[in-house]
Amino acid sequence: MATPALNSQVQSLVAEYSVFWQFWPQFEQIRGERRLVGFEVELIGSHTSDLNHVDPSCPTCRHVRSVLLAIVDLMPGELTLSRNSFTYNIDPHSNSIVCLPALGNRSAVSVSIYVVWNRSNGQSFETDLLKEVKTFLNRWSIHQH
Ligand SMILES: [Zn+2]
């Protein structure tokens, strides 16, 4: 659990960097049937409205990324569901800058967490897991885009 001081510091950075998240369901084709096997949650933040800002070595972009990564790192520990029931993988997309139409083509950095669950868990597990992820992000005042 993050301390209140860290919390408010991160929360002000979330506002400063206009952090939001996007949700990407991951499907697999199993015996001709398309099934949801997991999801990617991508946290995105940007420190500039300069459309020509594309500099992977920019220290402020690196800071935005480190804030996103700190938040994503906390996520798995905050999920109350059994850790054996899913696996996850965090990708800080270290050298890439994205350009987002949703942000008026502002340049931004992103960090993704990929969550894949074990086959047998069933629909309610998937729903519960998603609910927990949303609750976690809400607590940081990070909204879905
Ligand atoms: Zn930058």
Image (cartoon, helix red, strand yellow):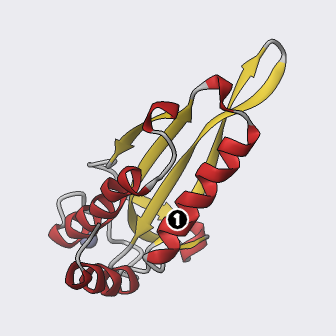
Q: Classify residue 64 by image quadrant.
A: bottom left
Q: Residue at x 55, y 68 (%)?
A: 135
Q: Indicate the position of residue 62 as horizontal and vertical percent values.
A: 21, 63
User: Which residue in the protein does label 1 denote?
Assistant: 21
Residue 57 x %, y %? 17, 59
Q: Residue at x 48, y 41 (%)?
A: 114
Which quadrant: the C terminus? bottom right
Residue at screen point 46% across, 76% down: 139
Q: Looking at the picture, tell me which residue is in the foreground, 26 or 46.
A: 26
Q: Does residue 35 appear left or right of residue 80 in this picture?
A: right
| Image quarter (top left, top right, bottom left or bottom right) of the N terminus | bottom left
132 or 56: nearer the eye?
A: 132
- The answer to whether mark 1 is within 8 Å of ligand 1 is no
Residue 84 appears at what percent x and percent y?
Answer: 46, 31
Q: Is residue 33 above or below residue 55?
A: above
Task: Give x and y (percent) for residue 93.
Answer: 34, 47
Q: Quarter of the picture for ligand 1?
A: bottom left
* Disc 1 residue crowd, few under 14, some 14–19, many 20+, Cα 10 Å: some
Residue at image x 52%, y 53%?
A: 41
